[in-house]
Image (tube, rainbow, N blue to C red):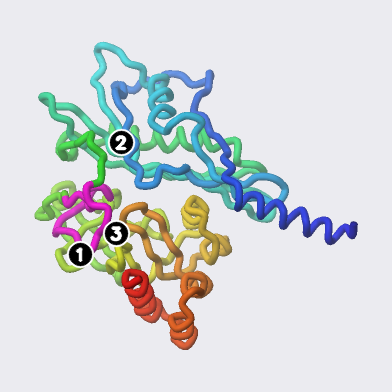
Amino acid sequence: MNKLFALFFVVVSTVAFSQNKTEFHKISLKDKKDKALGLNFYVENVYDGRQFKGNIGTVQKGGFNRKVLANFEKPLAEEFFDYLAVICPKEDNKPKISIRVNDLYVSELTRAMSETGYATLEIDVIESKAGVDYIVGSYIASTESNGMDVTGKHDERLKKVLQDCLTDYLKTSDADKTTLVFEVDQNIKNKTLVNVPLKGVYLTYLDVLNGKPLEDANFDITNKKERFYLFNKATKAEEMNYYGFSDGQNFYINVSKYASARHYAKTEIINGKYFIENVVYNPNNAIAMGAMFGLIGVAIASASGDSSIPMLIDCYTGQPSFLSNSEMKLMLSSYPELLKDFKNSDKSSNAKKEILQKYYQVILEK
């Protein structure tokens, strides 16, 4: 067999296999070398509040750096609880807390001479007072490390971001703690979103779908070149860990996991999806998000430099769609008239939005 053809066959076969068969790289937080860190609390419960629970991101395998989904060996709550039982063991004289994991993902980026591994974690910390559970703070941490092969170090990065979140919690004074009632029930009552959510601030996607906003009297909204920020007048700090907020006219969603800067973006709701006109996305995180949902296209192909692109985010599943021209053509491939309209358009964000509105209207009328 011709060597060039043989190489081509291997590459195509490898890519096809990785796309057609669900393959997981398993990560465990268990390590006999872990020891107690002297934290003055122990963790009673760990809740998995992620919107998407199918995996925790992607790693790269083999000589061709195949993107493979990553997941824990055991359920996320169990992995975290077992690890926390080691670093902050239960003792009678220690207060107890619980945590809810709202987001977690890992990814890798390959450069010419090295690889970079990334991990991001977002949690709520819960304290019990007089028999009532309260969310007293939300914390987010990210880390990265370089090496020739970073796949085997994701457990270390995940432990670091967890410890960073807990350290930030310890630094929070009682005066700066929130008192948001925590509900164990994680069931979604409304699986579709048609109108702009009720006015207020939303801690998680569940609160949006269940119509449970926080009062926004203590918050100010600022607009800096169409990047929106939420200022907490009580703590005198920008709140970047909330899922989003509504001013009654528009809903603003936190795009930190996609964007190269942490901010909220104005959305329009199209058929149960948040349409965002432009996100200057972070390739490292966008690659992880795209691969997690089996997406290919501009976000997966672009691994260098930031790019601006319109997006759709499913209100229920959290699945993102990066609306490149090629992705639009793929979506419209079964609708010749709409595809023709798109090809004849200026391909702007507004043009894509108008085509999408027609596209979903056609689907609803079927």
Q: Position of residue 285 (x, y in %)?
A: 47, 54
> Hey, what amino acid is under mark 1?
Asn
Q: Which residues are magenta?
A: 189-211
Q: Position of residue 294 (x, y in %)?
A: 52, 54
* Sequence-earlier tag: 3 or 2: 2
- Marks counted in the figure total 3
* Sequence-earlier tag: 2 or 1: 2
Would residue 283 be counted in the magenta stretch?
A: no
Residue at 56% from the left image edge and 48% from the top image edge: 108
Q: Residues within 10 Å of mark 3 (few under 14, many from 20)?
A: many
* Residue bearing mark 2: 100
| Secondary element at tag 3 | strand
In which quarter of the view is residue 180 placed?
A: top left
Residue at 63% from the left image edge and 49% from the top image edge: 18
Number of the front mark, 1 or 3: 1
| Secondary element at tag 2 | strand
* Residue bearing mark 3: 253
* Sequence-earlier tag: 1 or 3: 1
- Residue 275 is marked as none
Number of the front mark, 2 or 1: 1
Q: Residues within 10 Å of mark 2 (few under 14, many from 20)?
A: many
- Is 161 located above or below residue 215 in the figure? above
Q: Position of residue 221 (x, y in %)?
A: 19, 62
> Hey, what amino acid is under mark 3?
Ile
How far apart in space, not on screen, are marks 2 and 1 (Cα)? 28 Å
Query: The C terminus appears in which quarter of the rendering?
Result: bottom left
Kindly report the secondary structure that dominates the magenta region of the rendered protein.
Answer: loop
| Secondary element at tag 1 | loop
Q: Residue furthest front?
A: 366
How far apart in space, not on screen, are marks 1 and 3 (Cα)? 15 Å
* Residue bearing mark 1: 195
